[in-house]
Amino acid sequence: MRTLLSNKFIMLGGAMILAMLLIALFAPLLTVYPYDGLDLANKNQAPSLEHMMGTDPYGRDVWCRVVYGSRVSLMVSFAAVGVAVVCGSVLGIVSGYLKGGFDLAAGRLIDIMMAFPSLLLSMIIGVALGPSTRNMCLSIGIPLIPIFYRVARGAALSVGERTFVIASESMGSGRFRTMFRHVLPNVLPQIFVVLSMGMGGSILAEASLGFLGLGIPQPTPSWGLIVNEGKPYMFTAPWTTGFSGAFIALTIWGFNLLGDGLRDHLDPRV
Amino acid sequence: MSDGGVLLDIRGLRVRFPMRGRGPVCAVNGVDLTLRKGESLGIVGESGCGKSVTFSSVMRLVQSPPAVLEGEILLDGRDVMRMSGAELRRMRGKEIAMIFQEPMTSLNPVMRVGKQIIETLRLHESLSEKQAEEKALEYFQMVEIPDARSRFWCYPHQLSGGLRQRVMIAMALICNPRVLLADEPTTALDVTIQAQILELLGRLRRKNDMSVVLITHDLCVIAQLAERVAVFYAGRVVEEASAGELFANPMHPYTMGLLRCVPTMRTVSRRLDMIEGNIPDPACLPAGCAFHPRCPFAADVCREQAPEKRFFGERRFAACHRAGEVG
């Protein structure tokens, strides 16, 4: 644990993510304006003492929008990665441990999913299911399944050959018990590394969908949506796109740092 | 010690692994072995002679398919080969338990050792967590783990190799199995720990009246623990005898060779003796006796005809055309 905290990447990435989470959690305390309060007289105002990040094309406070947007963006990303981690890891572990027919079938299914560019797949699912927060999570999460599947399967293949797995079978432990008591815990470190990388990807996917207008319906703010709204005024009023874009970048950077740090920490060969 | 009843009876066991693009690897080629109640049987042979595969088959731990298994493995008259998955799970650990060669890797690294034993116990016996913990602790003390109570909640990496092997033994014995298969239990340990572990196994065998199969390539280990010995070569039993007879009067040229390889205090030689050549490729075994290319006594008949067992008393045989003539 001490070595974990002495890793600069983990510390920095962790601190950034923690800060984002706190911002999302305490959003009402950090803002004075409502996130959907239109004030067309004051649109596209530059940052000032009243509006520390300026106002957007509808006169709404950008800081307030970004802070509330973090709630949506982070929540959707966590839920999406949650869906992907559970489905991908379970499928991957079962494939890697049982091998044979199940592995073949699941592997081909995953291949089909990987054949689509992930943003395109997100868009297809998003359009097919219609706009809502739950569908957002699914449309972002499903394209992430192959990442977790592949990591979990590879790790389960190697763990499954280790003596303690055979030993547990030799003591009369059934397949499912062996899989979830012995294989799964030993696969978790690898999954954790991809988990934080996947979070970054998922924030980006959410922002992209929001930017393309396929995200959470208006007026609920999400980071991608804010960037999209500020886009026509990017040169005259860059603060709207700039600050929301910076939050996206910082969060992704934080997750990537954490992921890199965890990988270095867990895998001394790198 | 052995009160006569046959506990485990392996009849004509063959194990083949089909290989893509060439002939199958014949790891076990017709092994017959009997293990009586309370008996300790030593299995010796070089690496790759089929000894581990034979006993993994007894536990049905050999993945089949792809492996092709033939023959009968009778445990108290029930054929292990025909058991269902549920029957196998009931048998494993409860009736036959196994200790593996690598104490470093045979425990789950992310689970506390005590918890692993409790889990194994509760697979077979309906005990509460508390009762299971007590029984497991008792076994920890029985396998002479010093300071058992505090070691109980350690992770495997916090224990030395010798201690881990003791934990494995405790885990294997916790459900009072009638047969213990020890697959090279001491190979990864240093010599002093090796002696302690073997002594412990011997004591526990007598105490629990269980049969032990000791698989090893080390004749010294056999001498310490086994009452009977079966010598494996190329997937066959080439000689079987009581330990005393085997060491005093080996019948098969391969056994003679093996015994000559063991240096004793009286060995006055600059180089250790060895058996020339290598164990044959199990994918293309030589015709006739599998040992003939390396055998100093090989005659024409050895090259053409696989030898039958020649008995020299009950449970004392050598599968060699020239057994009894040479030596």
Image (cartoon, coloured by chain):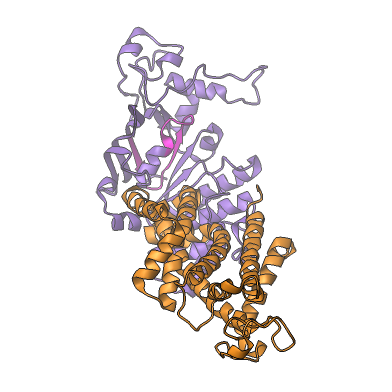
Chain colours: A orange, B purple
Seen in the image, is B113 located left or right of residue B40? right
Which residues, given as a range, are shown in magenta?
B32-52
Q: Residue at x 74, y 62 (%)?
A: A8
The spot of residue A72 in percent (x, y) is: 53, 78
Find residue B261 and report its image quarter: top right
Q: Residue at x 54, y 37 (%)?
A: B221
Image quadrant in which the N terminus of chain A is located: bottom right
* Image height of A231 relative to A256, above or below: below
Q: Would residue B30 be seen by someone viewing this image from the given angle?
A: yes
In the depicted view, which residue is nearer to us: A155 or B306?
Answer: A155
Per the image, is A224 magenta? no
Per the image, is B51 magenta? yes
In the depicted view, which residue is nearer to us: B32 or B249?
Answer: B32
Q: Residue furthest top?
A: B300
Find residue B23 and report its image quarter: top left
Q: Would residue B36 be seen by someone viewing this image from the given angle?
A: no
In the depicted view, which residue is nearer to us: B6 or B21?
Answer: B21
The spot of residue A126 in percent (x, y) is: 40, 69
In the depicted view, which residue is nearer to us: A179 or B281?
Answer: A179
The spot of residue B189 in percent (x, y) is: 61, 43
Q: Residue at x 68, y 17 (%)?
A: B270
The spot of residue A77 in percent (x, y) is: 52, 71
* Image height of B135 relative to B322, above or below: below
